Structures are given as C-alpha cells and as structure tokens.
Amino acid sequence: MTDEAARAAVEEHPGQDGSSEISVDRPLGTPEDLQAHAHLLDGTSGVAPVLPLRFGAVMTDDTAVEEELLAAHADEFAAALQELEGRRSTS
C-alpha cells in the first residue's frame, strides 16, 4: 500500500475528534471500535491489498509502527503482499 493510500484510508475513517489516537480513558474493544476497525479494513481493501492486524493491536506512536511492526516483520509482510498481488476481495 502506498503512503498516500494509507493516509486516505485513515483520513476517511478518523476518530470522533478527527484524530486516529486511542483514548486511554476507556477500555478497548467496544462494538463501535470493532466496527470502525472493520470499516477501515474494508475501505482500504478497495484500493490496495490489506494484511489486517488482529483487532485491538495498539502501537504507541508512528515510530513504534515503523520499527516494532513494519521493520521487524518486513520480509513476512512483503511475501504475504506478493501472494495477494492481483487478487480482489469478495467481501
């Protein structure tokens, strides 16, 4: 997925206050959280292959996403995306 496509998907489905930050004032996992997660994955899958994270995966900041998730698993993600190349979601 290009950076532009990822940004567009997040901007299309921001949090209630316009951000994508997680509130620490309440537990994760409300029906609304799950619905927003599914909506984001569905919207993104229309423009690019999606490797969904398990619902409830939370990273502390952009650096954590880049280093702890993306860089640490780059080979696995690249192989999975290569396998999905050219396929369309039927959901």
Image (cartoon, grey):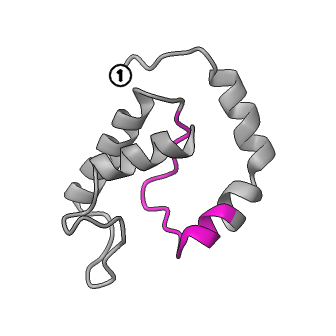
Vertical arrangement, residue 61 with respect to residue 55, above or below: below
Q: Position of residue 67 (x, y in %)?
A: 71, 66
Amino acid type indicated by mark 1:
Ser
Left or right position of 64 against 67: left
Q: Position of residue 13 (x, y in %)?
A: 28, 50
Q: Please identify the quadrant where the N terminus is shown.
A: top right
Instruction: State the count of labels.
Output: 1
Quadrant for the C terminus in the image: top left
Which residue is drawn at the image coordinates 33% and 82% (left, top)?
24
User: Residue 48, relative to residue 22: is it above or below?
Assistant: above
Instruction: Tell me the residue at 30%/76% (across/down).
Output: 27
* Circle 1 SS class: loop
Which residue position holds label 1?
A: 91
| Extreme-right residue of the structure | 75
Residue range (magenta): 50-66
Residue lying at 21% horizontally and 56% vertically, measured from the top left:
31
- Near mark 1 (Cα within 10 A), the count class, few <14, some 14-19 or many ≥20, is few
Is 53 included in the stretch rendered in magenta?
yes
Is the stretch drawn in magenta largely helix, strand or loop? loop
Location of residue 87 with respect to 62 vertically, above or below:
above
Find out whether residue 87 is within the magenta segment.
no
Image coordinates for residue 3, horizontal then vertical, percent: 55, 46
Q: Quadrant of residue 70?
A: bottom right
Horizontal arrangement in the rendering, residue 65 relative to residue 71 (left or right) = left
Q: Name the side, left or right, on which 35 lies relative to 72.
A: left
Q: Which residue is the extreme one toward the front?
A: 4
Instruction: Using the image as rendered, state which of residue 89 and residue 19 is in the foreground.
Output: 19
Front in this rendered view, residue 1 or 89: 1
